[in-house]
Amino acid sequence: MDALLKGLPLLYLSACDAAKTGKNWQVFLPAASLVPAAKRLRAADYFLEDICALDCEEGYVVTYHFAHFEKPGRPSLRVVVPHDAPSLPSIASVFGGAEWHERETRDFHGVIFEGNPNFVPLLIDPDMADCFPLRKDPKSRSKTRDILEAGDVVFCDPSFTLMTPDAPAAGQESGGEKAATA
Amino acid sequence: MTRNANMEHLAGDFYTNNFAKTAKEGSLILNLGPQHPSTHGVLRVIVEMDGEYVMRAEPVLGYLHRMHEKMAEVKTAAQFIPNMGRVDYGHALAWNWAFVGAAEKLAGIEVPERAEYVRTITCECNRIASHLLWWGAYLLDLGAFTPIMYAFDDREKLLDILQVPTGSRLTYSYFRIGGVAQDLNEDCLGRIRKFIPWMRSRLPMYKDLVSDNIILRKRIEGVGVIEPDLCRSFGATGPVARGSGINYDVRRAEPYSIYPKIDFEVPTSELMDARGRYDVRMIEIEQSLRIIEQCLELMPEGDVLVKGAPKPSWKVPKGETYFAVEGGRGKIGVYLASDGGKNLYRTKLRAPGYCNLSLFAEVSRGTILADAVAILGSLDLIIPEIDR
Amino acid sequence: MAAQNLVAQKPDVIVADPLLNIGPAQQIMDICRSMSLWPMTFGLACCAIEMMAVGMARWDIARFGAEVFRPSPRQSDLMIVAGTVSKKMAPAVVRLYEQMPAPRYVIAMGNCAISGGPFKFKGQYGMVEGVDTLIPVDVYVPGCPPRPEGLLEGLFKLQEKITGKRFWPNPPLNGPYEEGM
């Protein structure tokens, strides 16, 4: 996986325990690297399983699960977007199936995917398209590191502190990853 | 002519207007559904037609959105199992399995061996029932009224078998986190043993009368060609991918339970059209019978539920997991994320029909409307799993 | 297609009294109607499969006159709402009901159609809690899904409602139950 994504700016790359988590790699990316990374996975014949958003304290962690018809393994790309401006580039031009997954993520969490060819509500009634049912009450959100496992870290950008224990400087924690998703 | 001057209902709704924005001059915009005689459920497809040819199609979903993912955040993990029976009522046990398998994977619970065999036997019986339901309904869509009678007759026998341990005919909530709810007793095992040769004797009749029937062949051969790269782009799995030559079956690719010990073939077809998908499913019925036979021989004695199995108040330990099983329609995935609280933090259900249907817009371009219906049927859609 | 004004509008044409209101003639008409109800194929979800099973060889609703499932509401007089009605689908349900010619009957099959069923929970956002909030229902058949025999009983209750009399024997309380396959 690190060979496949070589050269792209990443925030965090770790090998996960496949027996427990079902995925073998997890990669946190800045939003700008998302489409190039998707293109590389498509060129390597991976297919998109689903797109899933997780509403955590630090933002929406949008996870892209990929799999391969011949090779084992499930690499997952993750992008964290802030709650007040949840916007990501769409990968529908790379993976045709992403169009529906992105529309569903917008229905449930309100994440906007720029460049999606048909960005209308998919599952929710258009009359109540802004109810965003799976968004959580801010009081009941958990931190990302309380849910996701760190895994064996291969690379971690110094500004990315979502998965590491509480960094001493509070400014570094909130400033670093939000700047990366601009 | 109209009694009321209010013509607002003739103006088209949100989706039709959205679709019409890019419609060509002089084309006909037609709504198939959401209520229509084919038995897929509430699927609506808006098609733009030039005469009898489909220029563009857009499936509109959400008419059966039953909020499963929201319910998973409100109920505890053990209380969510009945939902899994209703997500896809065709192959409900596979969804049961995907969910309890994910919870067991996350929590590290090991299932007793007999339970694994019971799960496999009942799941494969359910797969045969699902494929028979598809077969009968598909032929009904194509205009043949008799095969569905035979399919439902076979299905009733299977439902009688599965009713004994599960208590349900259709929407099973039989699996538990740590095993299954109840063992298969001798009566049930005897019925299964009688069913297998009986089903085997029916399959040649179906082949002679239906599969080799010239009318069916003319309707589905050459219709709906799906290239393997399209499957990759849209994430299509199951008989849709196998009918295009991709040898991908979750039971072999991400083996779970006792499938590595069982000898069975994964059928593929090089035809890539509706005929290929049809053949794959018919062969899968025979392979499921093989799997059940081997499981009946290999099944050991023992418990079917692990000691200290989670009770309804059980909290899922912290972590995330993704577990996939092979359902009748393709790869069923359940993603669970938990922070150790009372309820699951996030449950994502990856339905195979969702990805299979998303390629319909591409595949149906330029076909005639009757072929578009044949393609829809060959994708084997069950709408509640697509809408979740 | 606003979700607000969903309740079926009162039809402009009310079923008029017959010109010759002769009791026995009306009774015969009622018996004929109840023995040849034409259901509309309105299977929404899981209950649809049990409705299909009722039409098949084992439970054979044709014995009771109702096997002619019509896809078009204009040609049917019984709407079996089998499955969950979501808010997105609700305008379609109402429109289909309004398109059926009178006298028309509705059976709410399954817990979802009766009250929302297993999908009713605090914070639910997308479902209509019972189809009787939209259209008038004549018979409720509970179950999730109800067994085909349950739907047949519902049909008999509807026939009883139309004619005032039940024509079929009540099922025995203590069997016989089916032996073997």
Image (cartoon, coloured by chain):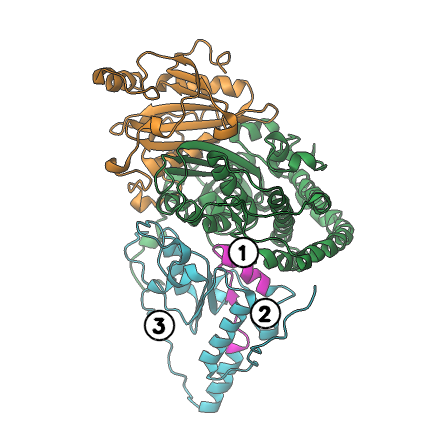
Residue that label 3 marks? C13
Name the image quarter holding residue B219.
top right
Percent coordinates x, y for residue C132 in the rendering:
36, 65
Residue that carries the numbered disc 1 in the rendered image: B37
Q: Is residue B166 magenta?
A: no
Helix, strand or loop status at disc 3: loop
Q: Nearer the viewer, residue C1 or B377?
A: B377
Badge 3: how crowded within 10 Å, few (<14), some, or many (20+)?
few
Q: Residue type at mark 3: give it.
A: Val
Q: Nearer the viewer, residue B335 or B215?
A: B335
Label 2 to label 3, Cα distance in Å? Answer: 31 Å
Q: Is residue B266 visible?
A: no
Say which of marks 2 and 3 sits in front: 2
**What whole-number distance in Å separates the C-alpha atoms at marks 1 and 3?**
28 Å
In the rendered view, does C132 fall on the left or right side of B349?
left
Judge from the rendering whether residue A70 lies leftward or rightward of residue A48; answer left or right.
right
Which x, y percent locates residue B62? 41, 46
Label at residue C61: 2
- SS at mark 1 in the image: loop
Image colour assigned to chain B: green
